[in-house]
Amino acid sequence: MPDLHLGLIGDNISASSSPRLHRLAGAQNRMAVQYDSLIPAEQGKPFEELFKHCRQSGYDGLNITYPYKETVIRYVTVQDPQVARIGAVNTVVFSSDGPLGFNTDYSGFLSSYQKERGTSDPGPVLLVGTGGVGRAIAFALLTLGARDIRLSDCSLERAYALAADLRAAVSDPITVTVGRTVSELAEGVKGLLNCTPLGMVGRSGTAIPAEDIPGAEWVFDAVYTPVDTQFLQDAAKARAQIISGYELFFYQGVNAWTFFSRRPLNEAQLRRSLLENEDTLSAA
């Protein structure tokens, strides 16, 4: 029997490094961790049934990824008011009081941003994709001081809903602009953020065209498989500062581990172990 039984529910997760991260975190703490990749279509169960199965079959916790971060919130108790405002959950702990929901995309992005940019003001930003991860990062941008946030999404209804929630979350003046076309919203921004699945393994392309990047000071891509997406390649050519999706992956995983295990981590050692493990797998 493992010391911790964890899993990841999502679509298109075959390339996820979350299983390795949590197994390596367990090894640091001399804990055996079983971490399962759970794709609803492959399991033959819709999300709701798969989540119920995990709850009833002894899982200690779950990570939740695209496209279920907003769906799962209906099945958990959220104790943190900020997570309730975000309206999305990516970490679930099965406790004696029932499933508890957390959002480590929010805290993970804060850590990622501060690692790369310190206390620099985000400035005007354009965030593309207002689903689960986009909502978490939009609220993190508020925490970092952003007061000019532009939202682009193929679903204007979803983007307008996030805009209303952002305005309601702060007492000081804030400008939130909504639209579909990136080029119309990108003019004059300091930061460009991709929070869509475009660019990941199996979803090639970019949500932010190369011609809209020049002039931006920094960029972020929530995608980390691969780390070097087309968007980040284009941003590097435009000499923008890059915050990669790998940083979000790392910090959200570290924070999720804390919720799952209540055990400490040596973050530098975990980074080294992940890279060494990656190299070993690549050479196999």
Image: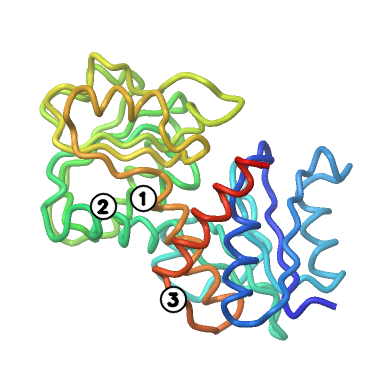
Left/right of residue 249 with respect to residue 214 in the rendered view: right
The numbered mark, 3 or 2, whose residue comes first in the sequence reads 2
Which picture quadrant has residue 26? bottom right
Q: Which residue is painted at 66% across and 36% down in the image? A: 12
Q: Secondary structure at mark 2?
A: helix
Q: Indicate whether 44 appears above or below 21.
A: above
- Whether residue 67 can be seen here: no
Q: Which residue is mark 2?
A: 141
Quadrant location of the N terminus in the rendered image: bottom right
Q: Which residue is painted at 79% across and 76% down in the image? A: 2
Which picture quadrant has residue 86? bottom left
**Label 2 crowd bin: few (<14), some (14–19), many (20+), radius 10 Å:** many
Identify the mark at residue 266; answer none if there is no mark.
Answer: 3
The answer to whether the residues at label 1 and label 2 have Cβ atoms under 8 Å apart is yes
Identify the mark at residue 137; answer none if there is no mark.
Answer: 1
**Label 3 crowd bin: few (<14), some (14–19), many (20+), radius 10 Å:** few
**Residue type, numbered disc 1:** Ile
The answer to whether the residues at label 3 and label 1 have Cβ atoms under 8 Å apart is no
Please name whichever residue, 34 or 162, is drawn nearer the observer in this view of the structure. Answer: 34
Please name whichever residue, 52 or 34, is drawn nearer the observer in this view of the structure. Answer: 34
> Looking at the picture, how far across and down is residue 23, in whole percent?
65, 66
Please name whichever residue, 20 or 208, is drawn nearer the observer in this view of the structure. Answer: 20
Count of numbered tags: 3
Q: Indicate whether 149 appears above or below 188.
A: below
**Label 1 crowd bin: few (<14), some (14–19), many (20+), radius 10 Å:** many
> Looking at the picture, how far across and down is residue 118, in whole percent?
16, 59
Please name whichever residue, 144 or 282, is drawn nearer the observer in this view of the structure. Answer: 282
**Residue type, numbered disc 2:** Leu
Indicate which label's residue lies in the foreground, 3 or 1.
3
Indicate which label's residue lies in the foreground, 3 or 2.
3
